[in-house]
Amino acid sequence: MKKRQGSLKNHLKNLVLVLLTLLLALLVALNWGTGLGRDNAPADSFFAQVYALLPMGDGGYIQRAGDTPAAYPSGIAMTAADGLRGASYNETAEGSLYESVRPLWADALAGARSFEKAEEAALQEALRGDTLFLSYNSSLPLSLLAGWMGADPAHTDSRSVASLVLTRGGVLYVRDGADGMLYRTVGGVKVDAGVWERVAAGVTAPPCSYAGTLDTQVYGALLPETLVPEGAAAYDVLQARMPAFGDPASGDSLQTLLAAFSYDPYVTNYSENDGATQVFVENYSALRVSQDGQVRFKANSLSGGLPAYQEGEVDAAGALAAQVDYAHEVLNAALGAVGSTIPAELESVRLDAESGAWNVQFNQTVGGLPVRRADGQPLARFTFQDGMLVAAELSLRDYVSTGEKLYVLPVAQAAAALDGASQYGYVVAYTDDGSGRVLPAAYRKDWRGGSAVG
């Protein structure tokens, strides 16, 4: 009886395969004969419905969506029935709200293509109504954020932004990440009233306020969309751990690091700098690994580069997201080689207008707080040319909690210490000064000259 059942299952599987093969052959023949393909078949036609059932992209690959975030918000809030609720620099409190509001952001960003300068007073007035808010530790392309929310980045502006405010009426304000200027969309963006109402009813984040809705004598020096939580916050004091590649007692895995860059562990290699650096040589590329966690990858030509995606796997609009995704994957694998579970976070994306290369930079975050090096160096830099990773510099490090807590300067006290000549952002971050002890502190974000201790 079991043999008969197995034979019947095999016959059914074979029949399904035959039918799929015939269907594919039919579509190929129709495509040749009519010129109708996945992209140009009428939406209500039989061909479009059949193509929709097939999971392949234009090149025979499943197209990558680019919806895996390489950075999460440093601040998030939404107006609930009892007022504004949200959190900043609080990974736990932000997580659930972020997932809830992604559909609203996807709708809004899908049509955010045209912007005009906006008045600060208009934003302050909007903040008194029903709003949705996001801010990031750094300046990131709006098209990337759209993809992470599930929208098509092809229909979103590529400007870099540091914060976003969406009103229930469909007005989107963004803070430019380069100079702090405020912009708003020309015309409205889509807001689903039913989704908004459902999400707002379920918000459980702590209560907070916008600085722009509070006493201007106290908070006037802050950007109006700055979140002001209730009470002070304490964060872990960290201990930095330097890698020790080559030391059997360290637990750091050179083999895992090599795999992150698609290198065979038995590839040709030699040492330099009196044995402090090991050099691995592949065809048209080299990987230098120092004992202290400094890693450098360099391709001598595009032939030695590492592909961020395969031909046909992404369209033109998704190419940047695919390169960021690939860099993020390589970096997280490299961090795993030193036993680190501290996530990497995208810090910046820049296009070299002369060479056409994309430069992608990352840092680390602990509990939602960015870790900054006192020397200004990032955790990692990646360079892509024509979709190929051609260079990378990593400075690997791990961080563990000491069990101590340290309170940082609350927003109100930080605002009181600022002059009123400009509007500042409020930032909480860790600073790694190389001493091994890493402390949290409050900073002001000065659009005129970067960041300074608040």
Image (cartoon, rainbow, N blue to C red):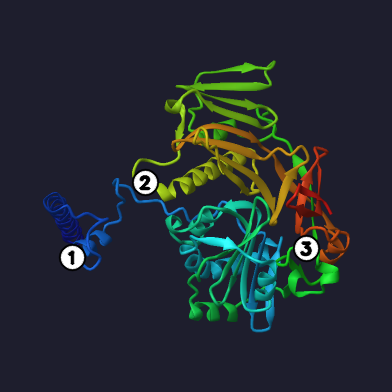
Q: Which quadrant of the structure image shows residue 391?
A: top right
Q: Is residue 135 left or right of residue 358?
A: right
Whether 322 is drawn above or below 104: the answer is above
Q: 10 Å neighbourhood of mark 3: few (<14), some, or many (≥20)?
A: many
| Residue 222 numbered tag | 3
Q: Who's the residue at 50% across and 74% down the image? A: 191
**Could you say which quadrant of the image residue 10 lies in?**
bottom left
Give the side of residue 21 with respect to residue 135, left or right.
Answer: left
Most foreground residue, 156 or 303: 156
- Residue drawn at the location 77% of the way across and 60% of the way down: 423
Of the two numbered discs 2 and 1 on the same chain, state the one appearing first in sequence. 1
Report the residue marked by disc 2. 313
Point out the image quarter for the N terminus: bottom left
Amino acid at the residue labelled 1: Phe
Q: Can you name the residue that lies furthest to the bottom here?
A: 81
At label 1, counting other C-alpha atoms closer than 10 Å, the crowd grade (few under 14, some 14-19, many 20 or more) is few
Q: Residue at x 54, y 37 (%)?
A: 352
Location of residue 14 in the rendering, given as x and y in whole percent from the top left corner: 16, 54
Q: Pick the quarter of the image with the C terminus.
A: bottom right
